[in-house]
Image: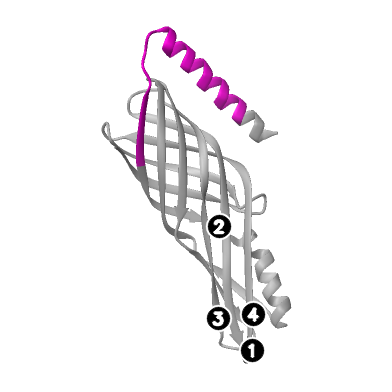
Amino acid sequence: MRILAILGVVLLASTTAYADNHEAGGSSKISFGLEAGYASAKTGSANSALAQSLADSTGRTVTVTYKQTTYAGRLFGLYELNEKLDVEVGYMNTGSLDSDFSFSGTTTTMAIGLKANGFDAGVRFKPNSDVFLKLGVHNYDLDAKGTVTISGTSYSATSTDNETKPYYGVGYNLNETTSIGVTIYTKVGGSDGGDVSFVYAGYKF
């Protein structure tokens, strides 16, 4: 229900701004760009099923530690409706948020890599020429994969989770082409996933 409400706000704001802009004789502008920086996430909830699966398979107690940050990049397109509102679409890809598994009774460890990737769409509200606010929805996959061998026996675990969830953020334009900002992508991988915070520097072509 919350997703439908956000999509409704985005659609209504976009439609109204587009109509007002064209009635005033304005022109729209399309541009593309890149955001690059670091993503941080708490992936414990998303990994709980994998940890339990490995514990059941090996018959051992599994201890898990989580990496919190990794690099990330996002390609985006902007459609400028007017001086106050843009429509944006994007594709995000992150590095690996590794989960290190250690097993009781052995020195063997295993790293399961978690990667987020997928598409998003929303709007940028521009209260002035310097600051912009983001609101939209994302549909990101959270992929996990790992393999370990204990006493000659191999064990593996994989999962892919996906669900449409909201995102929001704030940014600051350093000049016409360069910006900095932070975007929060909520519940990446679904209801059991963690929020991903993306701190970036952006460049618009």
State which region is magenta.
7-33
State how far apart marks 2 and 4 are (Cα). 25 Å
Q: Secondary structure at mark 2?
A: loop
| Vertical comparison of 87 with 191: above or below | above
Viewer-nearest of labels 2 and 4? 4
Q: Amino acid at mark 1?
A: Gly
Residue 93: which disc? none
State how far apart marks 3 and 4 are (Cα). 12 Å
State how far apart marks 3 and 1 are (Cα). 11 Å
Q: Is residue 44 left or right of residue 1?
A: left
Return the disc, 3 or 2, that comes first in the chain's sequence. 2
What residue is pinned by disc 2? Answer: 42
What residue is pinned by disc 4? Answer: 155
Return the disc, 2 or 4, that comes first in the chain's sequence. 2
168 and 85: which is toward the camera: 85
| Vertical comparison of 59 with 194: above or below | below
| Vertical comparison of 30 with 49: above or below | above
42 and 165: which is toward the camera: 165
Q: Secondary structure at mark 1?
A: loop
Q: Quadrant of the N terminus?
A: top right
Assess whether residue 191 is covered by the magenta stretch.
Answer: no
What residue is pinned by disc 1? Answer: 105
Circles 1 and 4, Cβ within 8 Å, touching? The answer is: no
Q: Quadrant of the C terminus?
A: top left
The image position of residue 36, as x and y in percent, is: 36, 49
